[in-house]
Amino acid sequence: MIDLQTFGDLSAVKVGAFAPKPTTLTPGQEEATAPLWSSEDGRTKIGIWECTPGHFTADRSAMGEYCHILGGTATVRNADGSGAREIGPGDLLVLPQGWKGEWVIHSPMRKLYILSSM
């Protein structure tokens, strides 16, 4: 039998302790997560992520990511500087597996993330 799970009011989910963002280009930038669900095979992971303002690199070589922005604003662009997108509350950002780029977070960001590998 499959256990159906629901998660209400994602804006109120408590995230873990903030820690330094490993790929930051801005000293002092921090992030925190609250994992919500993971598939048995580890190929799909869902959770809440928060990050303080700053600039960091991202590499989605191993898993694609779908980001539903719950709060905050950012600019996301490809590693070569192309394709810049402004994102904010209510937006869905799709980062296909293989994508590499940069984020510039303008105000504290909170998102629901879904990581998925092919």
Image (cartoon, grey):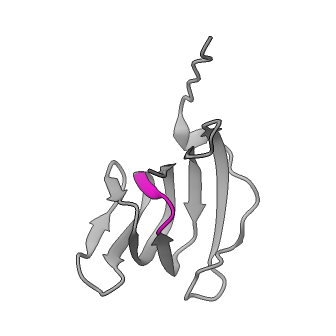
- Report the residue at 32% width, 78% height from top: 78
Judged left or right of residue 74, residue 7 is: right
For image coordinates 57% across by 66% down, the residue present is 51
Q: Residue furthest left?
A: 83
* The N terminus, quarter of image: top right
Residue 84 x %, y %: 26, 76
In the image, taking residue 95 as reference, residue 2 lies left or right, namely: right
Question: Residue, x 57% and y 18% (percent of image)?
Answer: 4
**Residue located 35% across and 73% down the image:** 76
* Image location of residue 111, percent across then percent down: 49, 53
**Between 83 and 111, which is closer to the camera in this rendering?**
83
Residue 40 lies, with reference to residue 43, above or below; the image says above
Looking at this rendering, what residue extends furthest in the right direction?
A: 17
Where is residue 40 shown, x and y percent of the image?
65, 36
Most extreme residue toward the top is 1
**Residue 17 quadrant:** bottom right
Q: Of 115 and 84, which appears nearest the observer? A: 115
Viewer-side residue, 41 vs 82 = 41
Count of marks overlaid on the render: 0
**Is residue 95 located in the magenta-colored stretch of the structure?**
no
Q: Which segment did they paint magenta? A: 61-67
Q: Position of residue 68 (x, y in %)?
A: 40, 49
